Image (cartoon, coloured by chain):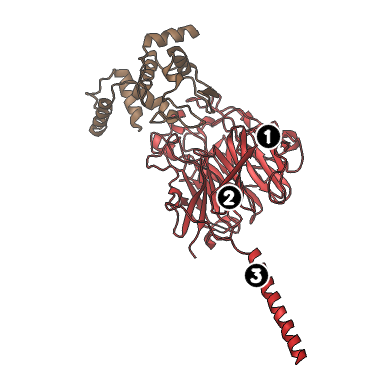
Amino acid sequence: MNKIFVLGFLLFPFGLLLSNSTKYSPKQTSETFSALQKTKFPGEIVYKKYCISCHQPDGGGVPHMNPPLINTSYVLGDKEPLIKIVLNGLQNTKIDDKTYTNPMPPLKALKDQEIADVLTYVRNSFGNKASAVTAAEVKAVRNKGK
Amino acid sequence: MKKNILISVLLLSAAIFAIFSFTKISSSTKIIPLPKADIDNAGLTLPAGFSALIVADNTGEARHLAVTKEGDIYVKLGSAKDGKGILFLQDENKDGKVDKQSGFGDYGGTGMYVKDGYLYASSNTDVYRYKLNDKDEVADQNNPEKIISGLLDRGEHNSKSVTLDNDGNIYVNIGAYSNSCQESDRTPGSMGMKGCPILDSAGGIWQFKADKANQTYGDGVHYASGLRNVVGLDWNQKDNALFVMQHGRDQLHDLFPKYYDSKTSAILPAECMYEIHKGDNAGWPYIYYNQIQKKQILMPEYGGDGKKTADKKYLDPVVAFPGHLAPNGLLFYTGNQFPEKYKNGAFIAFHGSWNRSPEPQAGYFVAFVPFKDGKPSGKWEIFANGFAGQKNLSPGSAKHRPCGLAQGPDGSLYVSDDSKGTIYRIMYSKK
């Protein structure tokens, strides 16, 4: 079974409590721990589950297909449009003068906290540095759209 | 005595004439020696006896290319650079390196092909042809003949590659504007649209007349269907048939995690080479090809579970490569420069994967498949590697990504790179 999936499965229902899991082998648990120790961002788990295949482990995206998350106005600028992209997806858009052809599906099924976490992670990884996104901000944008 | 002198003079003149004529003939048929390879073989790893050089660099998004009988190179750029979408590269001092560059055609695109006195070029919606003069140069760069127009471009898989047969037909790929014909493209769990409506105008190969202006869908023949996206295609002269390389679907794990783990999703489905005849259907989006089990598997969007096979039988591939390598160029080698093994075999330029993460990416090489009598006669192998210039492969940071292939008049193999715009020439120099 996919390690990341296991990780995601463990994390969200039990809120970062991993120590007493007996369902998984000791090896997996220790790997889980070391993965957690490496990052201070819970959003990394969300990123690895939902974003990594298109936006890539280094956030570099795929030229002409999937936009990079490194040093772009979309990621580092206003939070509201960024939150909207995650909620509603994006299709065939020009970003910083470059066209990307693969559509991004809407991820509105994610919880406010998960979206806040992953955006905070993205805004502070791959060389990015920008303010955190809170669950309340995600909630406000989500409610506006209704 | 006088007679003898006369004979001698005649003989001498004949000899001089013969020598002179011979020199003239041999100079006109003189084989131009191969240029010097780069010391590091242009950064490539090649089989023994082969060498390479960079003939041009930083040309732009060099998609497909064509080499004329004079050795000049036409390159189609993915997007026009300084208002020029087609480059014409020449090597005037014959040292192997381009020293004269010009351009024309203000549109981006992929297709580039030279045949019977014309240069064919495609944008993402249209196909043009330019008349060539006896030196294979385009005389009127501003007024090409628009032979096909109005082909679908909805962003995803919009490149229109072209190749020609020997009966005056041109074949154009129209890629599906979708990954797997889901109701909501690339959305986890979304099921496939019933009777995939994309297939009526995309996801296949269309045949048009190469010499007829202003054709569109209605004038063409829907030659083959069920092909998700083809970028590399070529006419096999030995078999007198069209061969194509399909880009297989993405994201089996992302979209259907209950049936596929990320390791399986990194290698499935196969990137397939198909031999195409009129009316063929390769099965997208209903099936994919599993290269390990050598079976057509029902797509999860259409009721599959990773194991079920389809009731209906679709076209089987002639070669099945590992998943996501992204074949962007296909060329059947008809030259005499390379060793016998390569004659009539297929070279495939693999652009390199993005859809294998979190597993390592793969591809970014040119592969070779030996052919005999129009059929594969052995296993595929990596022919030229090292384009990415790094061990950890990633589409964003790869230095070069192989895209187009062309054969030079002397049998050299040319490879284009649409990342940095490098044009490579690969030669066999061991005698």
| Label 3: which secondary element | helix
Chain coloured red:
B
The front one of B233 and B285 is B233
In the image, taking residue B173 as reference, residue B96 lies left or right, namely left
In front: mark 1 or mark 2?
A: 2
Q: Which mark is residue B23?
A: 3
| Label 1: which secondary element | loop
Q: Is residue B161 above or below residue B31?
A: above
Colour of chain A in the rendered structure image: brown
Q: Is residue A10 visible?
A: yes
Residue A117 drawn at (x, y percent):
35, 17
Q: Amino acid at mark 1?
A: Asp
Q: Which mark is residue B91?
A: 2
Residue depicted at x 43% and y 13% = A79
Q: Is residue B380 visible?
A: no
Asked if labels 2 and 3 share a chain, the reply is yes
Q: Are marks 2 and 3 in contact (CB under 8 Å)?
A: no
Q: Earlier in the sequence, mark 3 or mark 1?
A: 3
Quarter where residue B260 is shown: top left
Quarter where residue B208 is shown: top right
Q: Which residue is mark 1?
A: B126
Q: Badge 3: few (under 14), some or many (20 or more) residues near its Cα, within 10 Å?
A: few
Residue B224 drawn at (x, y percent):
65, 41
The front one of B280 and A137 is A137
Residue depicted at x 61% and y 30% = B196
Quarter where residue B345 is shown: bottom right
